[in-house]
Amino acid sequence: MIHSSVHSVENPVERLREPNYVTPDAFPLDLEIGITRHVLEEIAACNIHSHDDMLHAAVTLDCRVRALLAALDAERGERP
């Protein structure tokens, strides 16, 4: 159970992404991989006991995974 003032009747939970969200155009795959490796190094230093650090890590990793998939799709000539 989450015990936080962020999640309350007065302040309902908001979605990270709306349904059918489309990732903006990605950089070339090799650049996206490099960015992701850098982000992973930064995320590894986050304090696992910090709500703010973990929220930042989750959102950042969500963005990175979406960008990597968009770059893979573009490299294969696919678009969602």
Image: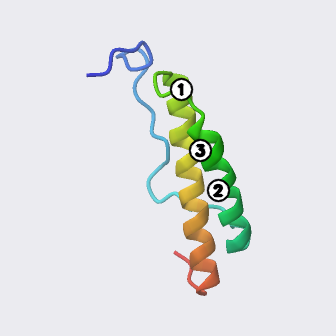
Q: Residue at point 55% right, 48% down?
A: 61
Q: Label 3 neighbourhood size at 10 Å, few (<14), some (14-19), many (20+)?
A: some
Mark closer to the observer (1, 3):
1
* Label 1 or label 3, whichever comes before in sequence order: 1
| CA gap, disc 1 and disc 3 | 15 Å
> Crowding at label 1, few (<14), some or many (≥20) Cα neighbours within 10 Å?
few
Do residues under tags 2 and 3 come within 8 Å of each other at their CB atoms? no
Question: Which residue is depicted at the point 39% across and 20% down?
Answer: 7
**Quadrant the N terminus occupies:** top left
Give the residue type at disc 3: Thr
Where does the image place residue 55, in percent across and percent down from the top left?
A: 51, 32
Q: Quadrant of residue 57?
A: top right
Residue corresponding to mark 2: 37
In the figure, is residue 37 to the left or right of 78? right
Q: Return the residue nearer the eye: 72 or 21.
A: 72
Q: Secondary structure at mark 1?
A: loop
Q: Nearer the viewer, residue 64 or 16?
A: 64
Q: Give the quarter of the image for residue 76.
A: bottom right
Is disc 2 placed on a helix, strand or loop?
helix
Residue 47: which numbered mark, if any? 1
Which callout, 2 or 3, points at the residue further toward the start of the chain? 2
Q: Dots 1 and 3: beta carbons under 8 Å?
A: no
Q: Position of residue 2 (x, y in %)?
A: 32, 21
Identify residue for label 3: 60
* Label 3 residue SS: helix
Residues tagged 2 and 1 counted as in contact (Cβ below 8 A):
no
Residue furthest left in the image: 1
Task: Give the Cα distance between marks 2 and 1.
Answer: 19 Å
Q: Image height check: is 4 above or below 18? A: above
> Amino acid type of disc 1?
Asn
Q: Which residue corresponds to the image point at 35% horizontal and 16% vertical from the top-left?
A: 9
